């Protein structure tokens, strides 16, 4: 069987020498419209739509979802970049202004969740909402947005995998973070694996939504399931910071988040008993 390699980067994606996709879709004057930005935008739209539908189904004002999403996205981007810069400071210590260039790669989904969570606490208090109920409404849309966003990461060449051991993989051209790390070596498509896992989690959360035993169960299961997925995929990620005992920063934080969420689930279940 013939081995396949996807080659992508500044000028597009090649499959067996045939151009099939462009990371830079088009220009508006001097402004580049990149596939990464388009996919992230589509992820936000999809996530908002899912949350809106769930809010309406739960008897909530759907317009609150639109008000929330606008500022939550800003908070999420800030959290994603701050998290990445903190845990990868060695990459920015020599040129701190590079930390401002989030479009060049380096956004942590865990940081985005943290930034979004802080804003969510403020928003819920301001609008006198039930925290756990609103969190359940948001969780399936959040993981759906993450799934589409990971396709954007794939096109941008960040959140890349380690060198592939078999005859297949994704090779990035110069100008991408992946190429800076591994050159033209074929890499495991970690972004697409995570995107697929995110979609599976979304489907499970939607399936459980009407069967949830208490408000907050869907949101807590999001943290448990995504943390388990992220912990596993970090073994194939090539851009993560190692910490101790061979574990990466994202794996350590995933363990802490999952255990905390499981603890809250157990506590709430016992209170219902």
Image (cartoon, rainbow, N blue to C red):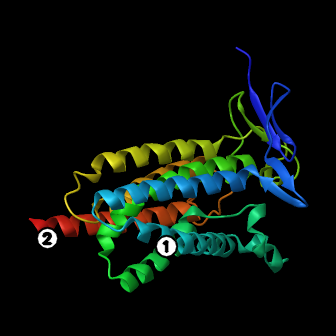
Q: Position of residue 57 (x, y in %)?
A: 30, 56
| Residue at screen point 56% across, 58% down | 44
Most foreground residue, 210 or 166: 210
Q: How busy is the neighbourhood of tag 2: few (under 14 within 10 Å), some, or many (20 plus)? A: few
- Give the vertical position of 149 relative to 66 (above or below): above
In the displayed structure image, the side of residue 249 where residue 18 appears, left or right: right
- Image position, residue 26 (x, y; %): 83, 49
Q: Which residue is at 43% across, 54% downward?
A: 50
Q: In this orientation, does residue 122 appear?
A: yes
- Where residue 6 sits, quadrant-wise, is top right
Marks 1/2: CA–CA distance: 33 Å
- Residue that extends furthest to the right in the rendered view of this protein: 30
The residue beneath circle 1 is 67
Question: Residue 182's x, y, as percent?
Answer: 80, 48
Who is closer to the viewer here, 259 or 119?
119
Q: Looking at the figure, which quarter contains the C terminus?
A: bottom left
Mark 1 Cα shell of 10 Å, populated few (<14), some (14-19), many (≥20): few
From the viewer's perspective, is 72 left or right of 32?
A: left
The residue under the point 21% across, 70% down is 267
Residue 109 screen position, x and y as percent? 57, 62
In-front residue for pair 229/34:
34
Q: Nearer the viewer, residue 183 or 102?
A: 102
Q: Which residue is mark 2?
A: 271
Assign the N terminus to one quadrant of the image: top right
| N-terminal-most mark, 1 or 2 | 1
SS type, badge 1? helix
Residue at x 66%, y 71% (from the top left corner): 81
Task: Judge from the rendering whether residue 265 lies leftward or rightward of residue 205; answer left or right.
Answer: left
């Amino acid at each position: 069987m013939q081995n396949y390699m996807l080659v992508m980067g500044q000028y597009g994606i090649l499959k067996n020498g045939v151009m099939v996709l462009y990371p830079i879709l088009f220009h508006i004057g001097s402004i580049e419209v990149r596939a990464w930005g388009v996919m992230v935008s589509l992820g936000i739209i999809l996530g908002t739509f899912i949350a809106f539908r769930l809010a309406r189904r739960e008897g909530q004002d759907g317009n609150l979802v639109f008000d929330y999403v606008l500022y939550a996205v800003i908070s999420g981007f800030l959290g994603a970049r701050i998290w990445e810069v903190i845990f990868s400071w060695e990459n920015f210590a020599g040129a701190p202004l590079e930390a401002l260039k989030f479009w060049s790669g380096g956004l942590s989904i865990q940081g985005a969740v943290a930034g979004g969570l802080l804003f969510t606490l403020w928003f819920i208090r301001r609008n006198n909402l039930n925290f756990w109920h609103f969190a359940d409404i948001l969780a399936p849309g959040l993981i759906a947005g993450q799934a589409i966003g990971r396709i954007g990461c794939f096109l941008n060449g960040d959140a890349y995998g380690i060198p592939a051991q078999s005859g297949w993989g994704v090779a990035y051209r110069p100008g991408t973070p992946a190429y800076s790390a591994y050159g033209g070596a074929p890499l495991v498509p970690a972004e697409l694996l995570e995107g697929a896992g995110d979609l599976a989690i979304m489907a499970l959360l939607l399936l459980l939504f009407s069967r949830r035993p208490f408000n907050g169960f869907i949101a807590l299961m999001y943290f448990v399931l995504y943390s388990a997925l992220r912990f596993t995929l970090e073994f194939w990620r090539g851009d993560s910071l190692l910490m101790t005992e061979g574990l990466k920063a994202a794996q350590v934080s995933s363990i802490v988040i999952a255990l905390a969420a499981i603890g809250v689930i157990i506590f709430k279940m016992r209170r219902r008993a």
